[in-house]
Amino acid sequence: MVTTSERMLELFELIRRVAPTDASVLLRGETGTGKELVARALHALSRRSEGEFRAINCATLTGELLASELFGHVRGAFTGAVADRQGVFALAEGGTLFLDEVAEISADLQARLLRVLQERTYVPLGGSTPQTADVRILAATHKALRREVAEGRFRADLMYRIRVIPIFLPPLRERYGDVEALAEHFVGELNAGGRRQVEHIASTAMDALLAHAWPGNVRELSNVMSYAYAVGLGDTITVDQLPPELRGEPPPIGPFDEGEPDLRRLERERLLAALRQTRGKKGRAAELLGMSRTTFWRKLREHGL
């Protein structure tokens, strides 16, 4: 985990102190703040690190499907259950189970999960034999769980079970000192496996990164650097290689709609970036992209440029 923020360094120290215990941890933070990354760090630093780390997003499944993912099922438990299947509690036995977006669990499943945490046993769907549940529970949410309890959407007793140690992950906009360090970190990762070796981020590009609000947090910054790396050329990431919204421009309007594949959008942006870098000199732009002039002109026509 990369940071220069005093607040985040204090959080990392808390993670190091908490990790060796078996206490349940509730991670709260906006989308993209790195909740699963912290959960994996807690597992890696724990006495359960040799065991499995299993993660499940509770917002993506509902009803029997989520119950089956959690507790498993026996053959014939419901329509489509053609064979016995282990759930994540069984797969994470002796290790760590990460329940992402835990606030989205239904009232019925909240009650079943509470029983598992109290009794340390569970019964697969359609089964009759209790199974042990030797797992450490880490949970995460982007919601204020106390408010969910006050408004009757989440059980107070379950909250206290999973919130023994609460950890709040601040959004990126509250730790701008990390934007530069993270951007350089992501560039290093891209250099390690890419076609391009970036040595610098231009000051104007960094200014644009620092001026952005980052509603998608660290995940959004990672995506932006991947975009700039892919569409750009040379050893410097410049401001014109950043997505339009970071340059204060509207998204590009072209002969494509929202359903067009990302690869085609990416190709168009690479063509535009090459033209910007060569001040519109098409022959030079073709050379930068490693294309023949014929191919370059054809692609310009295809993209309506």
Image: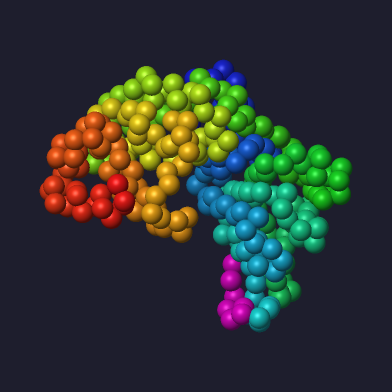
Residue 289 visible in the shown view: yes
In the image, residue 271 sits, relative to residue 117, either above or below, namely above
Figure colour scheme: rainbow
In the image, residue 59 sits, relative to residue 246, either above or below, namely below
Q: Position of residue 291 (x, y in %)?
A: 16, 47
In this rendering, position of residue 102 left or right of residue 53: right
Residue 16 visible in the shown view: no
In this rendering, position of residue 238 left or right of residue 258: left
The mark total stands at 0
Name the residue at 48% across, 38% down.
250
Q: Main secondary structure of the magenta part?
A: loop
Name the residue at 59% across, 67% down.
86
Name the residue at 67% across, 37% down.
28
Q: Position of residue 219 (x, y in %)?
A: 50, 39
Please tell me in which quadrant of the rendered image residue 170 appears. top right
Magenta segment includes 56: no
Please tell me in which quadrant of the rendered image residue 164 appears. top right
Q: Position of residue 44 (x, y in %)?
A: 51, 40
Q: Position of residue 300 (x, y in %)?
A: 25, 49
Please tell me in which quadrant of the rendered image residue 159 appears. top right
Magenta segment includes 81: yes
Magenta region: 80-86
Name the residue at 37% across, 19% down.
203
Residue closest to the eye, 222 or 140: 222
